[in-house]
């Protein structure tokens, strides 16, 4: 029977996996830059997020991801969502009377 891994072995495996993923990501970035040269370089995704500027395609993708996440949460917890909607309705009704 296989012996359980020690914590040190697991950490080393995770470090190796992270290093491999970082190298893969760097090679993909290099390949993308060499395959698609442009007159003015596009801002890095991190820089675009920091400045609050996103392209239309990115914005659509983000909205799609948020919509999917909301739909999955609603599907997983319908009673909680109904309760929150009811409380929100009561709160709006109470505030509109004042």
Image (tube, rainbow, N blue to C red):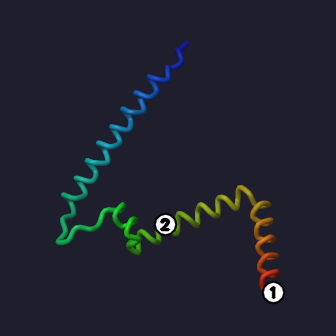
Which residue occupies the foreground of this view, 77 or 46?
46
- Neighbour class for label 1 at 10 Å: few (<14), some, many (≥20)? few
Question: Where is residue 70, by image quadrant?
Answer: bottom right
- Neighbour class for label 2 at 10 Å: few (<14), some, many (≥20)? few
Q: Which residue is mark 2?
A: 62
Spatial CA distance of label 2 from label 1 is 37 Å
Residue 96 sits above or below residue 88 on the image: below
Which residue occupies the foreground of this view, 68 or 89?
89
x, y percent for residue 80: 77, 60
Q: In the image as oriented, which residue stretches furthest toward the bottom?
A: 97
Quadrant placement of the N terminus: top right
x, y percent for residue 74: 70, 62
x, y percent for residue 7: 49, 23
Nearer to us of marks 2 and 1 is 1
Left-right relation of 22 to 60: left
Which residue is at 40% across, 65% downward? 49
Residue 3 sits above or below residue 51 on the image: above
Which residue is at 53% across, 14% downward? 3
Q: Which residue is mark 1?
A: 98
Which structural element holds mark 1?
loop
Residue 76 sits above or below residue 52 on the image: above
Question: Where is residue 46, by image quadrant?
Answer: bottom left
Labels 2 & 1 near each other (Cβ < 8 A)? no
């Amino acid at each position: 029977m296989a012996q359980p891994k020690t914590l040190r072995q697991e950490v080393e495996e995770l470090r190796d996996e992270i290093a491999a993923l970082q190298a893969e990501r760097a090679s993909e970035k290099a390949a993308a830059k060499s395959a698609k040269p442009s007159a003015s370089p596009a801002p890095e995704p991190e820089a675009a997020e920091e400045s609050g500027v996103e392209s239309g395609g990115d914005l659509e993708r983000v909205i799609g991801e948020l919509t999917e996440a909301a739909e999955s949460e609603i599907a997983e917890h319908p009673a909680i969502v109904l309760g929150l909607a009811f409380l929100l309705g009561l709160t709006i009704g109470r505030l509109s009377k004042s």
